[in-house]
Image (cartoon, rainbow, N blue to C red):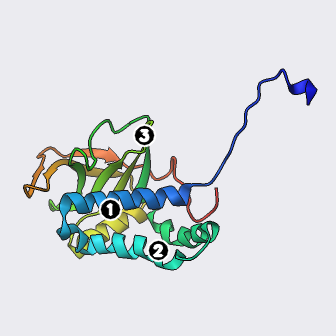
Amino acid sequence: MERTLGEDWCIETTADLSVAVAVSVIKSAHLTLFALLGYSYALSCSGHLVGDGVLGRIFRETVGSSQREAEELARPILSEWVHAVRPLEGGAWGVGGTIADGSLLFAWTGSGQPWAAIVRVPLGDDNDFAVMLPCSSRPDDLVTYLDFLRSGSQEIRVKLAELEPEAGKCGVSEREFPVRWPKSDDTCDLSDRL
């Protein structure tokens, strides 16, 4: 011990927070869509899938469990949703896409219908996440969303939308642009412990 007193010391604590973070940011994005899109989102098949099929199922299957048991029970449920959550390193998105500014990115089908909404969930210190959730009430669009999550495709076409929930307004930009949604880099496999 005495020999190392003059050396620099570093104490490090590590923890696997991938399940807790995934659940938290999916919940935040889901509540953001509910706040911005209202009951039409919450009662749609997309809102039901996220609210009851993912978040509700995790709650029902983990209630009363220890933290470690809850994480292990949640992993298989979240495994299909691993590509719905992307880290935004260094503020890559810039500003916007939050409940505070009322803007979202919508992914569009070739027929001109939105099939997913992308929400930015700010965690501070440039540790933001982008969360892509289904947003349509059309079953075909829900299939498009799930197919995208399961596929190797990494490019989507999006439009920026400015929403004013109190006024019941949603202005969608005419300009459509491509966005890369990576599925290999920085992907956490929630089926295995890190």
Q: Nearer the viewer, mark 3 or mark 1?
A: 3
Q: CA distance from mark 2 to mark 1?
A: 15 Å
Report which quarter residue 125 is drawn in.
Answer: top left
Q: Residue at x 38, y 37 (%)?
A: 92
Q: Nearer the viewer, residue 5 or 186?
A: 5
Is the C terminus in the top left, top right, bottom left or bottom right quadrant? bottom right
Residue position marked by numbered label 2 in the rendering = 59
Residue position marked by numbered label 1 in the rendering = 30
Image location of residue 182, percent across then percent down: 43, 49
The 10 Å Cα crowd at callout 3, few under 14, some 14 to 19, many 20 or more, is: few
Q: Residue at x 32, y 35 (%)?
A: 94
110, above or below 13, in the image: below
Give the SS element for disc 3.
loop
Label 2 or label 1, whichever comes before in sequence order: 1
For residue 11, side relative to residue 23 (left or right): right
Q: Nearer the viewer, mark 2 or mark 1?
A: 2
Label 2 or label 3, whichever comes before in sequence order: 2
Q: CA distance from mark 2 to mark 3?
A: 26 Å
Image location of residue 100, percent across then percent down: 25, 46
For residue 56, side relative to residue 42 (left or right): right
For residue 77, side relative to residue 153 (left or right): right
Residue position marked by numbered label 3 in the rendering = 124
Image location of residue 90, percent across then percent down: 43, 34
176, above or below 45, in the image: above
Q: Nearer the viewer, residue 81 or 47?
A: 47
Amino acid at dot 3: Gly
Amino acid at dot 2: Phe
Amino acid at dot 1: His
Q: CA distance from mark 3 to mark 1?
A: 19 Å
Image location of residue 6, percent across then percent down: 84, 20
Report which quarter residue 1 is drawn in.
Answer: top right
